[in-house]
Image: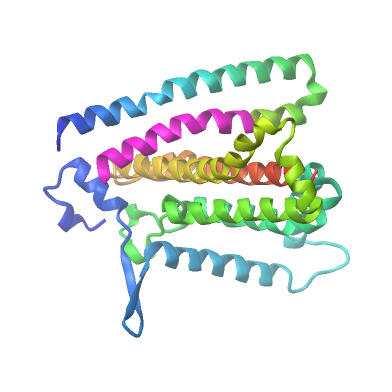
Amino acid sequence: MNEAASEGLSLGERIAEALKFRTIFTVHFGSLSVPVTETVVTTWIIMAILIVGSILLTRRLQEIPRGAQSFLEAGVGFLNDFAKKQLGHHAKFFAPYIGMVALFLGVANMISFISPMSGFGFEAPFLLKPPTRDINVTAAMAVMTILVVLFSGLIVRGPVGWVKALVRPSPIMLPFNLLEYIIRPLSLCLRLFGNILGAFIIMELIGMFVPVLVPPFIGLYFDFFDGLIQAVVFTFLTTLYIAEAVE
Amino acid sequence: MDPLIAIGAGIAVMTGIGAGVGISLATGKAAESIARQPEASGKIQSVFLLGIALSEATAIYGFVIAMMALFS
Protein backbone atom coordinates (compact mmCIF):
# COMPACT_ATOMS: atom_id res chain seq x y z
CA MET A 1 0.00 0.00 0.00
CA ASN A 2 1.15 3.52 -0.74
CA GLU A 3 2.03 5.10 2.61
CA ALA A 4 1.51 8.70 1.50
CA ALA A 5 -1.98 7.96 0.21
CA SER A 6 -2.99 5.99 3.29
CA GLU A 7 -2.26 8.79 5.78
CA GLY A 8 -5.34 9.97 7.55
CA LEU A 9 -7.48 6.97 6.65
CA SER A 10 -9.24 4.95 9.30
CA LEU A 11 -8.32 1.31 9.91
CA GLY A 12 -11.34 0.00 8.04
CA GLU A 13 -10.64 2.21 5.04
CA ARG A 14 -7.03 1.08 4.92
CA ILE A 15 -8.11 -2.57 5.01
CA ALA A 16 -10.67 -1.91 2.29
CA GLU A 17 -7.92 -0.23 0.27
CA ALA A 18 -5.66 -3.27 0.66
CA LEU A 19 -8.46 -5.60 -0.40
CA LYS A 20 -8.97 -3.89 -3.76
CA PHE A 21 -7.69 -5.59 -6.90
CA ARG A 22 -5.70 -3.11 -8.89
CA THR A 23 -5.91 -3.14 -12.65
CA ILE A 24 -2.41 -3.58 -14.04
CA PHE A 25 -3.31 -2.89 -17.69
CA THR A 26 -6.29 -3.07 -20.01
CA VAL A 27 -6.60 -5.16 -23.16
CA HIS A 28 -8.75 -3.81 -25.99
CA PHE A 29 -10.70 -6.04 -28.35
CA GLY A 30 -12.34 -3.54 -30.67
CA SER A 31 -14.89 -1.73 -28.50
CA LEU A 32 -14.53 -4.26 -25.69
CA SER A 33 -11.92 -3.43 -23.06
CA VAL A 34 -10.89 -6.17 -20.65
CA PRO A 35 -9.12 -5.05 -17.46
CA VAL A 36 -6.27 -7.36 -16.45
CA THR A 37 -6.11 -7.31 -12.67
CA GLU A 38 -3.40 -8.07 -10.17
CA THR A 39 -4.89 -11.54 -9.66
CA VAL A 40 -4.36 -12.54 -13.29
CA VAL A 41 -0.81 -11.21 -13.36
CA THR A 42 0.05 -13.04 -10.14
CA THR A 43 -1.42 -16.22 -11.61
CA TRP A 44 0.82 -15.78 -14.66
CA ILE A 45 3.82 -15.41 -12.36
CA ILE A 46 2.85 -18.62 -10.56
CA MET A 47 2.46 -20.40 -13.90
CA ALA A 48 5.88 -19.14 -14.95
CA ILE A 49 7.42 -20.37 -11.69
CA LEU A 50 5.83 -23.81 -12.10
CA ILE A 51 6.66 -24.18 -15.81
CA VAL A 52 10.26 -22.97 -15.52
CA GLY A 53 10.70 -25.08 -12.37
CA SER A 54 9.41 -28.22 -14.09
CA ILE A 55 11.59 -27.66 -17.17
CA LEU A 56 14.70 -27.03 -15.08
CA LEU A 57 14.08 -30.00 -12.79
CA THR A 58 13.32 -32.53 -15.55
CA ARG A 59 16.00 -31.39 -18.01
CA ARG A 60 18.66 -33.94 -17.16
CA LEU A 61 17.00 -36.96 -15.64
CA GLN A 62 19.30 -39.83 -14.75
CA GLU A 63 18.75 -43.48 -13.96
CA ILE A 64 20.15 -43.04 -10.46
CA PRO A 65 18.64 -39.88 -8.89
CA ARG A 66 21.04 -37.33 -7.51
CA GLY A 67 20.60 -33.95 -5.85
CA ALA A 68 17.44 -32.14 -6.89
CA GLN A 69 16.16 -35.16 -8.80
CA SER A 70 15.78 -37.21 -5.60
CA PHE A 71 13.57 -34.48 -4.10
CA LEU A 72 11.58 -34.28 -7.35
CA GLU A 73 11.04 -38.05 -7.39
CA ALA A 74 10.03 -38.04 -3.73
CA GLY A 75 7.48 -35.27 -4.38
CA VAL A 76 5.99 -36.85 -7.51
CA GLY A 77 5.96 -40.24 -5.79
CA PHE A 78 4.15 -38.75 -2.79
CA LEU A 79 1.40 -37.24 -4.98
CA ASN A 80 1.05 -40.44 -7.02
CA ASP A 81 0.87 -42.60 -3.89
CA PHE A 82 -1.75 -40.29 -2.42
CA ALA A 83 -3.87 -40.57 -5.58
CA LYS A 84 -3.38 -44.34 -5.73
CA LYS A 85 -4.43 -44.82 -2.11
CA GLN A 86 -7.69 -42.94 -2.66
CA LEU A 87 -8.56 -43.84 -6.23
CA GLY A 88 -7.14 -47.33 -6.77
CA HIS A 89 -6.68 -48.26 -10.42
CA HIS A 90 -8.20 -44.96 -11.63
CA ALA A 91 -5.23 -43.11 -10.12
CA LYS A 92 -3.18 -43.11 -13.34
CA PHE A 93 -5.78 -40.96 -15.07
CA PHE A 94 -6.53 -38.53 -12.24
CA ALA A 95 -3.10 -38.17 -10.59
CA PRO A 96 -1.97 -35.37 -12.99
CA TYR A 97 -5.05 -33.28 -12.16
CA ILE A 98 -4.65 -33.82 -8.43
CA GLY A 99 -0.96 -33.00 -8.61
CA MET A 100 -1.72 -29.87 -10.62
CA VAL A 101 -4.27 -28.66 -8.06
CA ALA A 102 -1.86 -29.34 -5.21
CA LEU A 103 1.09 -27.59 -6.89
CA PHE A 104 -0.88 -24.57 -8.07
CA LEU A 105 -2.67 -23.99 -4.78
CA GLY A 106 0.47 -24.64 -2.78
CA VAL A 107 2.43 -22.00 -4.67
CA ALA A 108 -0.56 -19.62 -4.91
CA ASN A 109 -1.29 -19.67 -1.18
CA MET A 110 2.35 -19.22 -0.22
CA ILE A 111 3.26 -16.65 -2.88
CA SER A 112 3.15 -13.76 -0.41
CA PHE A 113 5.65 -15.62 1.74
CA ILE A 114 8.15 -16.14 -1.05
CA SER A 115 7.63 -12.70 -2.60
CA PRO A 116 9.64 -9.69 -1.35
CA MET A 117 8.38 -8.47 2.02
CA SER A 118 6.63 -5.13 2.34
CA GLY A 119 8.96 -4.26 5.22
CA PHE A 120 11.88 -3.86 2.83
CA GLY A 121 10.28 -1.04 0.88
CA PHE A 122 8.98 -2.96 -2.13
CA GLU A 123 6.03 -1.41 -3.89
CA ALA A 124 3.00 -2.94 -5.44
CA PRO A 125 3.91 -4.70 -8.72
CA PHE A 126 6.68 -6.60 -6.96
CA LEU A 127 4.72 -7.23 -3.80
CA LEU A 128 2.80 -10.39 -4.64
CA LYS A 129 -0.44 -11.11 -2.86
CA PRO A 130 -2.05 -14.56 -2.97
CA PRO A 131 -4.41 -14.79 -5.98
CA THR A 132 -6.63 -17.16 -3.98
CA ARG A 133 -7.88 -14.20 -1.92
CA ASP A 134 -9.87 -13.36 -5.06
CA ILE A 135 -13.13 -15.32 -4.99
CA ASN A 136 -13.04 -15.67 -8.79
CA VAL A 137 -9.91 -17.82 -8.65
CA THR A 138 -11.26 -20.16 -5.98
CA ALA A 139 -14.61 -20.33 -7.77
CA ALA A 140 -12.83 -21.33 -10.98
CA MET A 141 -10.91 -24.05 -9.14
CA ALA A 142 -14.09 -25.34 -7.49
CA VAL A 143 -16.02 -25.39 -10.79
CA MET A 144 -13.14 -27.26 -12.44
CA THR A 145 -13.17 -29.85 -9.67
CA ILE A 146 -16.92 -30.40 -9.84
CA LEU A 147 -16.75 -30.72 -13.64
CA VAL A 148 -14.06 -33.39 -13.25
CA VAL A 149 -16.26 -35.15 -10.68
CA LEU A 150 -19.33 -34.93 -12.93
CA PHE A 151 -17.66 -36.16 -16.12
CA SER A 152 -15.57 -38.85 -14.44
CA GLY A 153 -18.76 -40.20 -12.86
CA LEU A 154 -20.55 -40.09 -16.21
CA ILE A 155 -17.70 -41.80 -18.08
CA VAL A 156 -16.81 -44.46 -15.50
CA ARG A 157 -20.36 -45.45 -14.57
CA GLY A 158 -22.06 -44.65 -17.85
CA PRO A 159 -25.19 -42.46 -18.02
CA VAL A 160 -27.48 -45.17 -16.64
CA GLY A 161 -25.18 -46.01 -13.75
CA TRP A 162 -24.81 -42.32 -12.97
CA VAL A 163 -28.56 -41.83 -12.74
CA LYS A 164 -28.82 -44.97 -10.63
CA ALA A 165 -26.21 -43.56 -8.26
CA LEU A 166 -28.31 -40.41 -7.92
CA VAL A 167 -31.30 -42.31 -6.51
CA ARG A 168 -29.21 -44.29 -4.07
CA PRO A 169 -30.02 -45.32 -1.33
CA SER A 170 -33.66 -44.43 -2.13
CA PRO A 171 -35.42 -42.12 -4.63
CA ILE A 172 -36.22 -39.69 -1.78
CA MET A 173 -32.52 -38.79 -1.76
CA LEU A 174 -32.59 -37.55 -5.38
CA PRO A 175 -32.90 -33.80 -4.61
CA PHE A 176 -30.19 -34.01 -1.96
CA ASN A 177 -27.83 -35.88 -4.27
CA LEU A 178 -28.45 -33.27 -6.96
CA LEU A 179 -27.92 -30.45 -4.46
CA GLU A 180 -24.49 -31.88 -3.66
CA TYR A 181 -23.33 -30.78 -7.09
CA ILE A 182 -24.04 -27.17 -6.05
CA ILE A 183 -23.07 -27.32 -2.39
CA ARG A 184 -19.73 -29.02 -2.92
CA PRO A 185 -18.18 -26.44 -5.25
CA LEU A 186 -19.70 -23.63 -3.16
CA SER A 187 -18.14 -24.90 0.05
CA LEU A 188 -14.82 -25.68 -1.65
CA CYS A 189 -14.72 -22.18 -3.10
CA LEU A 190 -15.74 -20.33 0.07
CA ARG A 191 -13.47 -22.37 2.36
CA LEU A 192 -10.33 -21.61 0.40
CA PHE A 193 -11.31 -17.99 -0.24
CA GLY A 194 -12.28 -17.28 3.39
CA ASN A 195 -9.16 -18.83 4.85
CA ILE A 196 -6.75 -17.03 2.57
CA LEU A 197 -8.62 -13.72 2.89
CA GLY A 198 -8.66 -14.04 6.68
CA ALA A 199 -4.92 -14.74 6.82
CA PHE A 200 -4.32 -11.86 4.40
CA ILE A 201 -6.34 -9.37 6.49
CA ILE A 202 -4.57 -10.44 9.69
CA MET A 203 -1.20 -9.97 7.97
CA GLU A 204 -2.28 -6.52 6.74
CA LEU A 205 -3.34 -5.54 10.29
CA ILE A 206 -0.03 -6.73 11.75
CA GLY A 207 1.82 -4.90 8.99
CA MET A 208 0.02 -1.68 9.91
CA PHE A 209 0.93 -1.81 13.59
CA VAL A 210 4.41 -3.34 13.35
CA PRO A 211 5.70 -2.76 9.82
CA VAL A 212 9.19 -4.24 10.22
CA LEU A 213 10.73 -7.44 11.55
CA VAL A 214 7.57 -9.01 13.00
CA PRO A 215 5.47 -9.74 9.84
CA PRO A 216 7.86 -12.35 8.33
CA PHE A 217 7.78 -14.44 11.50
CA ILE A 218 4.02 -14.29 11.95
CA GLY A 219 3.74 -14.80 8.19
CA LEU A 220 5.40 -18.14 8.76
CA TYR A 221 2.17 -19.26 10.36
CA PHE A 222 -0.47 -17.31 8.46
CA ASP A 223 1.02 -17.38 4.96
CA PHE A 224 3.08 -20.54 4.97
CA PHE A 225 1.37 -23.01 7.30
CA ASP A 226 -2.21 -21.93 6.74
CA GLY A 227 -1.71 -21.75 2.98
CA LEU A 228 -0.20 -25.22 2.93
CA ILE A 229 -3.01 -26.67 5.07
CA GLN A 230 -5.67 -25.13 2.82
CA ALA A 231 -3.96 -26.46 -0.32
CA VAL A 232 -3.85 -29.92 1.29
CA VAL A 233 -7.50 -29.71 2.32
CA PHE A 234 -8.64 -28.61 -1.16
CA THR A 235 -6.62 -31.38 -2.82
CA PHE A 236 -7.86 -33.94 -0.31
CA LEU A 237 -11.51 -33.01 -0.78
CA THR A 238 -11.09 -33.00 -4.58
CA THR A 239 -9.61 -36.50 -4.44
CA LEU A 240 -12.33 -37.69 -2.12
CA TYR A 241 -15.13 -36.39 -4.35
CA ILE A 242 -13.56 -37.98 -7.44
CA ALA A 243 -13.08 -41.24 -5.54
CA GLU A 244 -16.74 -41.21 -4.55
CA ALA A 245 -17.81 -40.52 -8.15
CA VAL A 246 -15.75 -43.33 -9.75
CA GLU A 247 -15.87 -46.06 -7.12
CA MET B 1 -20.34 3.48 8.88
CA ASP B 2 -23.69 2.47 10.26
CA PRO B 3 -23.04 0.91 13.70
CA LEU B 4 -25.69 -1.70 12.97
CA ILE B 5 -23.48 -3.05 10.16
CA ALA B 6 -20.59 -3.47 12.57
CA ILE B 7 -22.83 -5.22 15.11
CA GLY B 8 -24.17 -7.50 12.37
CA ALA B 9 -20.64 -8.37 11.26
CA GLY B 10 -19.75 -9.17 14.87
CA ILE B 11 -22.73 -11.47 15.21
CA ALA B 12 -21.85 -13.21 11.93
CA VAL B 13 -18.32 -13.93 13.16
CA MET B 14 -19.77 -15.67 16.23
CA THR B 15 -20.06 -18.79 14.03
CA GLY B 16 -16.46 -19.27 15.14
CA ILE B 17 -17.75 -20.60 18.46
CA GLY B 18 -19.28 -23.63 16.79
CA ALA B 19 -16.20 -24.27 14.66
CA GLY B 20 -13.95 -24.04 17.73
CA VAL B 21 -16.03 -26.54 19.68
CA GLY B 22 -16.23 -28.86 16.67
CA ILE B 23 -12.51 -28.79 15.93
CA SER B 24 -11.60 -29.31 19.58
CA LEU B 25 -13.94 -32.31 19.80
CA ALA B 26 -12.45 -33.77 16.62
CA THR B 27 -8.89 -33.20 17.86
CA GLY B 28 -9.64 -34.80 21.21
CA LYS B 29 -11.19 -37.86 19.62
CA ALA B 30 -8.35 -38.14 17.09
CA ALA B 31 -5.73 -38.02 19.87
CA GLU B 32 -7.71 -40.58 21.83
CA SER B 33 -8.00 -43.00 18.93
CA ILE B 34 -4.33 -42.64 17.97
CA ALA B 35 -3.40 -43.42 21.58
CA ARG B 36 -5.62 -46.48 21.42
CA GLN B 37 -4.49 -47.66 18.00
CA PRO B 38 -1.17 -46.07 16.96
CA GLU B 39 -0.92 -48.27 13.85
CA ALA B 40 -4.05 -46.66 12.36
CA SER B 41 -2.68 -43.12 12.70
CA GLY B 42 -2.47 -42.59 8.93
CA LYS B 43 -6.14 -43.32 8.37
CA ILE B 44 -7.17 -41.36 11.45
CA GLN B 45 -5.16 -38.40 10.27
CA SER B 46 -6.86 -38.25 6.87
CA VAL B 47 -10.34 -38.53 8.41
CA PHE B 48 -9.36 -35.92 10.99
CA LEU B 49 -8.17 -33.48 8.32
CA LEU B 50 -11.43 -33.91 6.42
CA GLY B 51 -13.45 -33.41 9.60
CA ILE B 52 -11.73 -30.24 10.67
CA ALA B 53 -12.00 -28.87 7.14
CA LEU B 54 -15.75 -29.42 7.17
CA SER B 55 -16.32 -28.03 10.67
CA GLU B 56 -14.06 -25.08 10.02
CA ALA B 57 -16.20 -24.21 7.01
CA THR B 58 -18.95 -22.85 9.29
CA ALA B 59 -16.56 -20.31 10.79
CA ILE B 60 -15.42 -19.35 7.31
CA TYR B 61 -18.98 -18.81 6.12
CA GLY B 62 -19.55 -16.46 9.05
CA PHE B 63 -16.34 -14.64 8.26
CA VAL B 64 -17.25 -14.25 4.60
CA ILE B 65 -20.70 -12.90 5.55
CA ALA B 66 -19.05 -10.42 7.92
CA MET B 67 -16.66 -9.30 5.20
CA MET B 68 -19.54 -8.86 2.77
CA ALA B 69 -21.41 -6.79 5.35
CA LEU B 70 -18.40 -4.59 6.05
CA PHE B 71 -16.85 -4.04 2.64
CA SER B 72 -19.55 -4.29 0.00
Q: How many marks?
A: 0
Residue plotted at (40% across, 40% down)? A198
User: Compared with residue A72, is residue A186 higher up or lower down, i.e. above or below?
Assistant: above
Residue A131 x %, y % = 45, 56
Q: Is residue A228 left or right of residue A17?
A: right
Residue at the front extreme, as displayed: A171
Asked if residue A130 shows in the view, the reply is no
Residue B47 x %, y % = 69, 29
Q: Quadrant of residue A229?
A: top right
Write the start and end of the magenta stretch as one range.
Answer: B49-72
Residue plotted at (29% across, 46% down)? A211
- Residue closest to the eye, A157 or B67: A157
- Residue closest to the eye, A90 or A57: A90
Residue plotted at (14% across, 38% down)? B1
User: Compared with residue A55, is residue A198 higher up or lower down, i.e. above or below?
Assistant: above
Asked if residue A20 shows in the view, the reply is yes
Per the image, is A152 magenta?
A: no
Residue A42 x %, y % = 45, 63
Q: Quadrant of the C terminus of chain A?
A: top right
User: Compared with residue B41, is residue A55 higher up or lower down, i.e. above or below?
Assistant: below
Residue at the left extreme, as displayed: A8
Q: Is residue B31 left or right of residue B1?
A: right
- Name the main secondary structure of what is drawn in magenta: helix
Per the image, is B51 magenta?
A: yes
Q: Quadrant of the N terminus of chain A?
A: bottom left
